[in-house]
Amino acid sequence: MADEAPFQLLHSELIQYIYKTTESGDREENGRNITRLENLGFRVGQGLIERLTKETARFKDELDVMKFICKDFWTSVFKKQIDNLRTNHQGIYVLQDNKFRLLSQLSAGKQYLDQAPKYLAFTCGLVRGALSNLGVKSIVTAEVSVMPACKTPSVTLIDQGNGSLCQCDEA
Amino acid sequence: MADEAPFQLLHSELIQYIYKTTESGDREENGRNITRLENLGFRVGQGLIERLTKETARFKDELDVMKFICKDFWTSVFKKQIDNLRTNHQGIYVLQDNKFRLLSQLSAGKQYLDQAPKYLAFTCGLVRGALSNLGVKSIVTAEVSVMPACKTPSVTLIDQGNGSLCQCDEA
């Protein structure tokens, strides 16, 4: 628990700092803050993936990259793997973390569900930054259905198609 | 290495964010940014020490508290202990970390020595926040003599006296 605490606490102070210094409360400013957090995450993701992949073999394909994100990358930040990875094999990937650490400090229930986006923006950027440095352009969005036990960030790679999602064999 | 990377990277992005959003470059603004970083660290330190001491026994005395900071607290953030703890037994403590992680990404040599304060402010706050939640009011300052291998943050507790520093038996 204490292992990821410094990161968690710093992340939550960062959110508070950004929101406090741009206090205006309107929806537009909130959107800009989300973007700020996303950009911060992007750069952290870039730096992190550089260190993590320094000595790994070249990735076979996109799915191979996504599996690395789900396992090694996610573990390095959140000390656990992604619980579930699904894909339509045409560029859409859905990563599900059933106990997302950056939300687990918030109360359960639907009460704070509207606060969730600001706790997800950094992580979306994190994944986008990591993928970007591996040569994969992507759009990363996240959603929360149940708090705090469940989270479904969905990673959409840019050249996406259609089709139903199916379970990946691993991760 | 990768273990503390997310925290390190987030810390360095935070510094960049704060300096970028308050771009003016004058000395006064720099001072305010240092204070901002110190305050952020203070709150992270408070949160962290709460989690770390949840199940520890009551501390015997101030030195006991300082040893906890040098070992458990420092390890939880920087994945290593403080290398050297000295005190004058009258309220002054000097903690030395010979391989301070938040500086180890900067170039060695004296070239960037003037950049060091902004990389130390957060950590000063971190220690002050932790001590504060343990009921110890303190002034925490830091200095760097050699980069990046050496760092001497000196923790001054508020009711300090005089006298020469001597080595503590442990830590």
Image (cartoon, coloured by chain):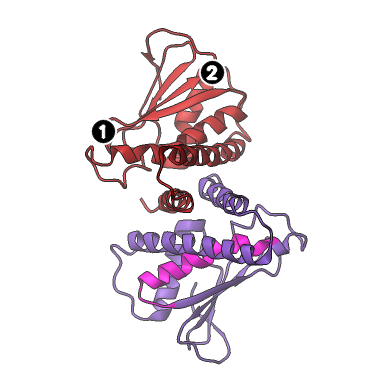
Chain colours: A red, B purple
Q: How many marks?
A: 2
Q: Quadrant of residue B51 in the image?
A: bottom left
Label 1 sits on what residue type?
Answer: Val
Q: Which residue does the numbered mark 2 point to in the structure image?
A: A158
Viewer can see residue B158: yes
The crowd level at tag 1 (other Cα within 10 Å; few <14, some 14-19, many 20+) is some
Q: Is residue B98 visible?
A: no
Q: Is residue B133 a member of the stretch shown in magenta?
A: yes
Which circle marks residue A146 in the picture?
Answer: 1
The amino acid type of the residue labelled 2 equals Ile
Disc 1 sits on a residue from what chain? A
Q: Nearer the viewer, residue A23 or A44?
A: A23
Q: Is residue B169 above or below residue A39?
A: below
The residue lying at 47 percent from left, 68 percent from top is B127
Residues in magenta, as a range:
B115-137
Q: Secondary structure at mark 2?
A: loop
